[in-house]
Image: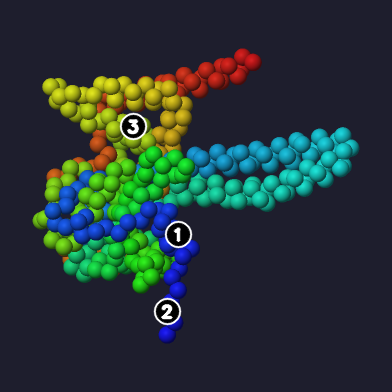
Amino acid sequence: MNKKPKRIFSAYGKLDQKTRNWRLLSPVNRNANSYAKGEELVYRMNETTLEIGQGMSHLRGLLWLIGLAGLGAFAFGFWITFFIALPRTLSDGDYDGVLGVMIFTIAILVVIGIPAMFFCLYLFLNDLFGYIDAPVRFDRIRRKIYVWASPAVRKEGPLELDWDQITPVAQSVSAPPFQVNAFKSVLLVDMDANGDVRFERRIPRIAQIGAALLTGEDTLAAYEYVRRFMEHGPDSLSPVKTHLVLRPRGMRPFVDGVGFLSIMRPYFNLPEHHQRSPGLITVITVLGSLFSMILVPYQWSAGIAQKWTTRLPRWPQRYDELAASGGPMQPPAGSEANDPPLLLQEKLIAALWHACAIAGYGWFVWHGMKH
């Protein structure tokens, strides 16, 4: 019997895995002595089921403005071409010029314009009205992993992976040509005998543990947290201080959508006799003020998407019944939500950034009216 040839070029094939810097986790990274951390990883859990995020909620709202700007640029270019340039050329009687403009315009539309328009439309709709996250559930009794999927993409419901059959992979992705920082994550991959990822109707059988981070130690610690739950149960887990929420409360997403205030928040909570790192706080505050005209719209776009327009994932009844066998699904005991009320210092800095943005917009309006 002929041996099945290995797949070299495909989605998650050998070439793609090399680009993503895939590295199979060795037993050294999977033993009981590894550091486990579940901070901003867990949504809910009980005795038999652990539900975590895949990091999508942190990014919601940061792309739809780009999509909207791209659609606006396309509409403006279309209007300039067909309602200004062509009528002027026709009025001058330059019919050869009209033919040249038409050929050039159609070529640009077909090659660049229409694909770019659909890409921008996808960014706008998916980021503003898509699901805020695709949570993953780990069932330690049945040794199963359930990866939530949109009903529009997969009518059969969540992907089901076997815990004992998956391969944990460390991924490190950076944007060339600048390889200074790389976003690292741990993936749980269902591979075939050739080492390629299995698919179900174009959906890769992969689960990501938490968000992609710049520190590989934190991603490995998140994987270890999940592994301990599956192998030893919830009693083996270290306490969690912060858990995830799907729909943030209050005004935090409107003033901290990019996360600058969250970087400074731990220093505001330090006791008086500890170093509060005034240098870091000053640098972030000044940079936020200088770039407030760009920062503030992104803050509000994130707030609108995360708090109002994105959809919440709903598990099919069967999977809720499976989880209910371990008791009520609740956040980790003693943990706080990752949307805490704004501190006074955060409110003052956010107000400063908004004031700088309003002043900048006002100056441009005044300058434009003056001239």
Give the amino acid at mark 3. Answer: Phe
**Could you tell which of marks 3 and 2 lies nearer the N-terminus?**
2
Q: Are marks 3 and 1 in contact (CB under 8 Å)?
A: no
Q: Can you identify the residue that label 1 sits on?
A: 15
Q: Residue at image x 55%, y 38%?
A: 69
Q: Residue at image x 29%, y 66%?
A: 166
Percent x, y for residue 67? 52, 43
Marks 1/2: CA–CA distance: 20 Å
Q: Around disc 1, counting alpha carbons within 10 Å, would you say few (fewer than 14), some (14 to 19), or many (20 or more)?
A: some
In the image, 107 versus 341, the foreground residue is 107
Q: Residue at image x 21%, y 60%?
A: 27
Q: Can you identify the residue that label 2 sits on?
A: 3
In the image, 323 versus 277, the foreground residue is 277
Give the amino acid at mark 2. Answer: Lys
Q: Secondary structure at mark 1?
A: helix
Q: Say which quarter of the image contains residue 96.
A: top right
Q: In the orientation shown, which residue stands out farthest toward the top?
A: 370
Residue 361 lies left or right of residue 368; in this view the side is left
Viewer-side label of 3, 1:
1
Q: Secondary structure at mark 2?
A: loop
Q: Can you identify the residue that label 3 sits on?
A: 260
In the image, 38 versus 76, the foreground residue is 38
Residue 134 lies left or right of residue 362; in this view the side is left
Q: Are marks 3 and 2 in contact (CB under 8 Å)?
A: no
Q: Secondary structure at mark 3?
A: helix
Answer whether residue 78 is visible to the viewer in this image. yes
Task: Give the number of marks.
Answer: 3
